[in-house]
Amino acid sequence: MKDKKTIYQIFFLIIFLILVFLVIRRHYIIKDLNSYNTKIEKRDSTEIENYKIQVYRNLELGNIIAYPNNNIFDRILLDEFAYKKYGVYLCHTLILDEDKEKVAKSIMDSVIFEKYGQNFYIKLLQEFDKIENTIPQNKTIDGYYLTVKQDYDDIAITRKYILNQLKERKLIPLNQNPFYPRVLRINFIVSKKGLIKNPQVLLKYNQKIDSTVVILLKELPFKWTPGTIEGKIVEFQQQIVFEFGVDPFYRKVD
């Protein structure tokens, strides 16, 4: 009988110790989770503030970027019209973080609405609809072809040449805030002779670098392969994009 009582005591003691262990373990798990959540919230808050730096820097550079949330805006000619008439760049690239996208849209929209009115997007569509049918198919507003048979290697060769020139001139890498904008986007026309003309900066990166790239494009030591449509050489519109450094908002956070 005494042995049986001892066994029960040992059994309940083990149960008690297990319960104590589980309670302590639960306490530390909750503590670790709270600590992790605090770090995540702090990190997200810091990233949002850093992203604001990028948005405001874009405005300082003169980059007014609209983030339309309607697929109807995803039209090449409408993008061209918005930039030519209002100096507004329509961005259709998704930002991978919803909070950052809201920040960018909120700040940029406030600038756009103050400058052009609260109904900017509606007005833009209405004005574009009036001229859309007057633009020949596969042509820009200025009458250049959009889609032609071309040598796409020309883009890569040109980008490599210009980046090498910028390095030789010690213009890159640029020592600046890592959260500043990192993209330079330039629009231009390729002539029938394969020459670059009318380069226009759509998204600015740095005044010195932007102007240097424009000059380099105009003075390329080689020609592009002329574009053709059904065997006929034509002038066409092209864009080239330069990305400098690493975008901190697309890095994996440990």
Image (cartoon, rainbow, N blue to C red):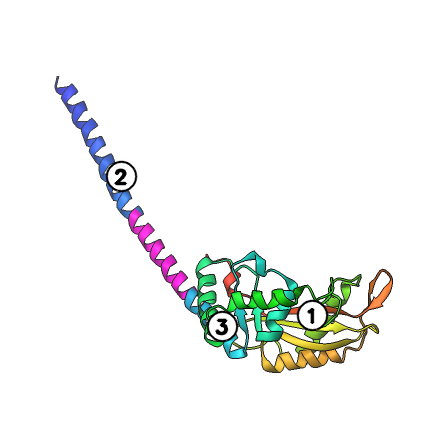
Q: Secondary structure at mark 3?
A: helix
Q: Earlier in the sequence, mark 2 or mark 1?
A: 2
The residue to which callout 2 is attached is 22
Say whether residue 214 is left or right of residue 15: right
Nearest the viewer among 139 and 92 is 139
The residue to which callout 3 is attached is 112
- Label total for image: 3
- The three-letter amino acid code for the residue at tag 3 is Ile
Q: Residue at x 87, y 62 (%)?
A: 231
2 or 1: mark nearer the eye: 1
* Label 2 environment density (alpha carbons within 10 Å; few <14, some 14–19, many ≥20): few
Q: Residue at x 65, y 81 (%)?
A: 211
Q: Earlier in the sequence, mark 1 or mark 3?
A: 3
Residue 200 spot, x, y in % from top left: 66, 76
Residue 170, visible in the rendered structure: no
Asked if the magenta segment contains residue 31, the reply would be: yes
Nearest the viewer among 129 and 71 is 129
Residue 90 spot, x, y in % from top left: 57, 66
Q: Which residues are magenta?
A: 30-47
Magenta stretch, main secondary structure, is: helix
Q: Residue furthest right?
A: 231
2 or 3: mark nearer the eye: 3
Say whether residue 52 is left or right of residue 162: left
Asked if the magenta segment contains residue 70, the reply would be: no
- The three-letter amino acid code for the residue at tag 2 is Leu
- The three-letter amino acid code for the residue at tag 1 is Ile
- Position above or below: 254 against 53: above
Instruction: Tell me the number on the disc at residue 141.
Output: 1
Give the CA separation, mark 1 to mark 3: 23 Å
Give the CA separation, mark 2 to mark 3: 57 Å
